[in-house]
Image: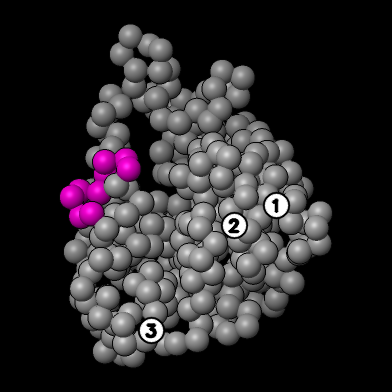
Amino acid sequence: MLHCSIPSTGQPHVTEGVMSVARLSGSGQCMPLIGLGTWKGDKGVVGEAVYQAIKLGYRHLDCASDYGNEQEVGLGIQRALKEGICTRSDLFVTSKLWNTFHARDHVELACRRSLEDLGLEYIDLYLIHFPIALKFVPFEKRYPPEWIHDPEAEHPKMEFANVTHRETWEAMETLVDKKLARNIGLSNYNAQSIMDILKYARIRPAVLQVELHPYLSQESLVWFCQSHGITVTGFSNFGSSSYIPLGMDQGHGSGALGDPAIKDIAAKHGKTSAQVILRWLVQRDIVCIPKSVKPERLAQNLNIFDFKLSDEEMKIMFSLNKNIRYNDPGEFCKGMGGSYPIYA
């Protein structure tokens, strides 16, 4: 079961070993430290990967409407449930509110669409995907709507909506009230935006999901969140490898996976570079959501709780930070008729 009591401090608490979970402030729900990322999970493949991951022991699935594959992810979930591999309460499923649905009247609409596609009655964690409000695009016109408002326009571009963070967050809170989401949180937000939300939140953000890997260690942001009772989830855990097919790797090739220092640490422990990176994150009380469709790598990514990095090895990992950000709307949105420098 993924429900457990929250420590009396109300702060995020991590338990390693058999459970390997983070307990979320507010709800007290348990969030597995290792989850399966589904970004770039190709149709025709991702459903089987989800099913196989659940068979291997994964109980945390990270999804989003913008990934365009929630229906297939849902089929993988339903297959596992039907076969009795686990129950719904064993799973922790995350989805995300896309930029075009930030207005008060559209938040619940978007959440219900994700629930329908996933075949679920509730989402364990619903995140605002980006602190970027774009003009609404109806489902019947295009889904997922992605970044550009009208791809067929003479000059296709993003079109922004005049929606505040407060309006969106208050609408997110009603999802908890209606039991459509058990926890709500943020993704790709910086400390200043989080501080703004904390000033008026009736239900505080349970989780912040951000890019996090050895070349972007985010120490200050992680400290800020954890000191405010917000659990941190890191995406793109291995660095630039996820961005090579998109031409966003900035010439770093295999990125952290090929880093000599990490390979040396891995050799000492008889582990892979990927396992060392995930172990480094977990020892920082950070939830990880590596993506893979290969059974052997899925199994390896779960197998990180039988070793521990020394203090010296942790220092070496931190020393690799280069503040390299691969997923930055301020950069990749420049080709969409504008940019949105949320990290500037």
Residue 321 in view, yes or no? yes
Residue found at the far top of this picture: 154
Span colored in magenta: 245-253
The reply to whether dot 2 and dot 1 touch (C-beta < 8 Å) is yes
Q: Name above or below for residue 40 compared with residue 2.
A: above
Label 1 sits on residue = 77
Dot 3: within a 10 Å radius of its alpha carbon, few (fewer than 14), some, or many (20 or more) residues?
few
Amino acid tagged 2 = Leu
Label 3 sits on residue = 270
Amino acid tagged 1 = Ile
SS assignment at label 3: loop
Label 2 sits on residue = 61
Dot 2: within a 10 Å radius of its alpha carbon, few (fewer than 14), some, or many (20 or more) residues?
many
Residue 124 lies in magenta, yes or no? no
Residue at (48% x, 78% y) in the render: 304
The reply to whether dot 2 and dot 3 touch (C-beta < 8 Å) is no
Mark 1 or mark 3, which is nearer the start of the sequence?
1
